[in-house]
Amino acid sequence: MGSKAPPKVASYNEKGYYAVTEGEAEILTPAPKDFDSVSSKIQSGQEVFYNPVQQFNRDLSVLAIRAFAQDFEYEREAKRRKFGDQREGRAQGRGKKRKREEGPNGVKARANRDSSLKANEDEEEPKQQQQQRHERPSPPIRILDALSATGLRAIRYAKELPVKTHVTANDLSAPAITAIKRNVEHNGLLGNIQTSTSDAIAHMNHAHSSSGDGPGTIPYHVVDLDPYGTATPFLDAAVRAVADGGLLCVTCTDSAIFASTGYLEKTFSQYGGLPLKGPQAHEGGLRLILHAIATAAARYGISIEPLLSLSIDFYARVFVRIHKSPAQLKMLASKAMVVYNCDAGCGAWSIQRIAHAKGSPNRNGEIVYKHTAAIGSSAGLECEHCGFKTHIVGPMWGGPLHNPYFIQRILEMLPSLDSKVYGTIPRIEGMLSTALQEDLDLENLEKHAAAPAKKADQDMAAFSAESVTASTSTGAETPSVRPVPPIDPAYRTTHPFFIVLTNLAAVIHCETPSEAAFRGALSHLGYRSSRSHTKAGSIVTDASWNVIWEIMREWVRQKAPIREGAVKDGTAGKGIMSHDRSNASLNDARETFKRASKSQDERTIRVEIEALLQRMGGKPPQDLEGVEQRAVAEGTSPPQDEAWRAKASPVQLSKLKINFDEVQGKKAMGKKMMRYQMNPLPDWGPMTKAKAISNDTDH
């Protein structure tokens, strides 16, 4: 292999620098004496001050803020028109009150004539005001790059966003500020980017204390937090520094904490919950991060709406919209959940909601929610599938990870982008397309769109009758339908996490089924399936663990027999395979008597045995009706099919006909995309924390 070309050399103030180009920005790094050693570092991505692996993060951030800015402009334009029309109506009302009602002698006639002229003037005035309002430029989008390091993010935002922006690049390190100023001047953005040498928390607290309606206020529409490690120390200040309806962008690179049980005591102290163990750890980490943001915001009467939450390489990146709405804040308890995880056994889990929000219409037809504590968990100390002990995880965010409208908006931009500027377009398309399909219950978007969003669209439709589109200061057009309407604040995901077929096969020591075969079996049983963006080979499904394990047992019977002696006594695989169809009722009886023997309560023993006899008779168990009632009370609608009712009935489960249809499974898998990243560089990762230059590098 030939040697790589040396980096580009640039001059600034009669000094030599290496120039690194990303997007439309070019940043300068000092050129040391040893050219060859530093050149190899830059080419291999090991130069601490700039990490090329993070280009995906920065490309995605530019597009996310661009999508947000379009939606923010829409909402700002709608409010401006609405309040402007109200002011004009009040002005017309005042004009009518000035009409005089006087007696004869010509005074009344003159008054009528004068009022007629005044009415014509009043009609002309609103038209002029409307014209002035349409022509008045919109104020810029205020963006804070709180931990700016080289200023690369701030420069890209200022150069690449198609809206008028005012960017503040803040860093505590004086050398970093020197580098930022050098890069800002090199890119010709002295009038667009303001530098600030300040502690990020102090700067954001000042933004909050200065916010308001008077002159000289500085609320930010977008705050970007990209620290080295966790972002939790900055969250309290950040959620208050964002304007109502604004965007908070957060990166956390400490995946060894939020996605690992190695330091669970530290995970709890930083994120307020315990981490998930297993292949779902990174999705669990995302939910811990969102829970930390939501609880930090809740202390100040602020609610959050996740627009996009991604586990990327070695870090997590989330984009949340800030709502200063006490009404929406009430939904937080119903979105929090605890997970019971069989991490040492078969890997199954069950979720426990902390609270419920049940909605019912009032006299005006508006939905009013009643908040109650959740019913106690039905999960026992031992996993019902393999008999191993379960462990508690969380509490964590149990709402949606994404807003599908937001993802669609970004995907719509991709065909028009320059691949030379956005070098990670294929991966953005693959990852966002996967994330778009993760939540199986958000397929019907209209059903879950929030009522305020529908009302905003109605208001904008009324304005569109006057003018289909409204020109903004940039010459762009505000669409007549809101680009990113919020999801109903009461919505919560019902099917979090995913399964991995290699892990399932490892439990029972069999050959791993193909993804197409397994998803084909799910489809034939009437279940939905998708992928998770957090891990290759993952399957998100609404099938219960009873059905999942029955499909695996059927796979063993039909396609991949287990070698004799491979599944040993006392293992999770032995517990799973003991529920074979041939002796389902017998094993169920053994488990029932085992549970009953541990109880000293005569009533408990009688209920257990009665339920067993009903199950062995092929009828639904006694508590099935209660399960249905609880589902209705929780606002969910479980599928009333054979597979769901088999959740508590082994006899009915034995009647399932499982077909491993790979053709059907491939249809569900969709087209091939770059959904998961391969290691881009040797020894890649967050790199060593910068010491001499800044604590907040473009890692």
Image: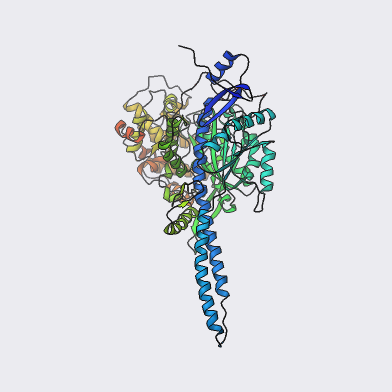
Along the viewing direction, whichever of 546 and 128 lies nearer the viewer: 128
Locate residue 171: give its quadrant: top right
Rendered image quadrant of residue 563: top left
Question: Residue 692 lies in what quarter of the image?
Answer: top right
State the image coordinates of residue 488 (x, y, percent, origin top left). Answer: 49, 50
Asked if 108 appears above or below 159 in the picture, the reply is below
Give the residue drawn at x 43%, y 43%. 611
Residue 564 place in picture, x, y as percent: 38, 19
In which quadrant will I find the C terminus?
Answer: top right
**Which quarter of the rendered picture does the N terminus lie within?**
top left
The residue positioned 51% from the left and 18% from the top of the image is 682
532 relative to 620, above or below: above
Front-lying residue, 425 or 215: 215
Q: Residue at x 64, y 46 (%)?
A: 218
Q: Which residue sits furthest bottom?
A: 105
Residue 78 on image: x %, y %: 50, 55
- Display colour scheme: rainbow
Q: Is residue 368 visible?
A: no
Q: Residue 324: x percent and y percent?
A: 59, 50
Residue extending farthest top: 1
Q: Is residue 674 left or right of residue 11?
A: left
* Most foreground residue, 232 or 461: 461
Q: Nearer the viewer, residue 4 or 486?
A: 4
Q: How many marks?
A: 0
- The answer, for residue 650, to whether it is visible in the render is yes
